[in-house]
Amino acid sequence: MDAFARLETTIADRRNADPASSYVASLFARGRGRIAQKIGEEATETVIAAMGDDPAKIVPEAADLLFHLCVLLADAGLCLDDVRAELDRRDGLSGLAEKAARPR
Ligand SMILES: N=c1c2ncn([C@@H]3O[C@H](COP(=O)(O)OP(=O)(O)OP(=O)(O)O)[C@@H](O)[C@H]3O)c2ncn1[C@@H]1O[C@H](COP(=O)(O)O)[C@@H](O)[C@H]1O
């Protein structure tokens, strides 16, 4: 099982855990708005790391961001396979061509 699959399983296991002993459970308890806010914070921290001079510092921030995104997906009843399916759907479709084909 890869890291993302393990993480999804752990997050699902934490849904009814005690928020006092589980960070994931505490996020579920605080709700979708708080989870979304954390994604904003972690995205900002990733941007700050990206603007620095040490690319290695992006890695832990990206991990925080992806972790919180996984919690958001779980909270919304979604999973990474849903995201994979969307990426598969886009595979081979140029971003520039897709944008040019959008209704104006
Ligand atoms: N991957 C992670 C992971 N990445 C980041 N974090 C936590 O995310 C939080 C984000 O850092 P911040 O400094 O922004 O958090 P904070 O200010 O303390 O949080 P707030 O009070 O602002 O909400 C920290 O508490 C990190 O420890 C994570 N917490 C848990 N996991 C995974 O989730 C599993 C279950 O964790 P628990 O639910 O805590 O058992 C763990 O075994 C890990 O696999």
Image: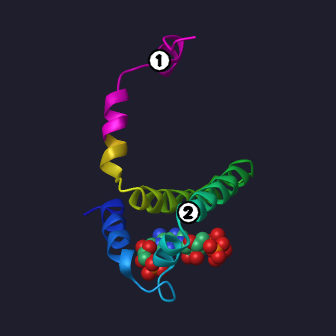
102 and 9: which one is in front?
102
The image's mark for residue 48 is none
Disc nearer the start of the sequence (1/2):
2
Q: Identity of the amino acid at label 1? A: Glu
User: Relative to residue 3, is residue 50 depicted above or below?
Assistant: above
87 and 60: which one is in front?
87
Q: Identity of the amino acid at label 2? A: Ile
Question: Marks 2 and 1: in contact by CB < 8 Å?
Answer: no
Give me the residue at 33% from left, 45% from top: 82
| Residue 16 position in % (x across, y down) | 37, 79
92 and 69: which one is in front?
69
Give me the residue at 30% from left, 68% from top: 9
Give the position of the N terminus as an image quadrant. bottom left
Q: Quadrant of residue 13?
A: bottom left
Between the residue at mark 1 and the residue at mark 2, the CA separation in whole angstroms equals 30 Å
User: Relative to residue 13, is residue 82 depicted above or below?
Assistant: above
Give me the residue at 58% from left, 57% from top: 36
Describe the element under mark 2 as helix, strand or loop. Answer: helix
| Residue 38 position in % (x across, y down) | 61, 62
The residue that disc 1 covers is 98
The residue that disc 2 covers is 35
Describe the element under mark 1 as helix, strand or loop. Answer: helix
Q: Which residues are magenta?
A: 85-104
| The CB of the residue at mark 2 lies under 8 Å from ligand 1 | no
Q: Is residue 93 magenta?
A: yes
Outermost left residue: 1
User: Relative to residue 29, is residue 5 depicted above or below?
Assistant: above
| Residue 15 position in % (x across, y down) | 38, 74
In the rendered view, does 16 fall on the left or right side of 39? left
Q: Quadrant of residue 58?
A: bottom right
Secondary structure mostly taken by the magenta-highlighted segment of the chain: helix
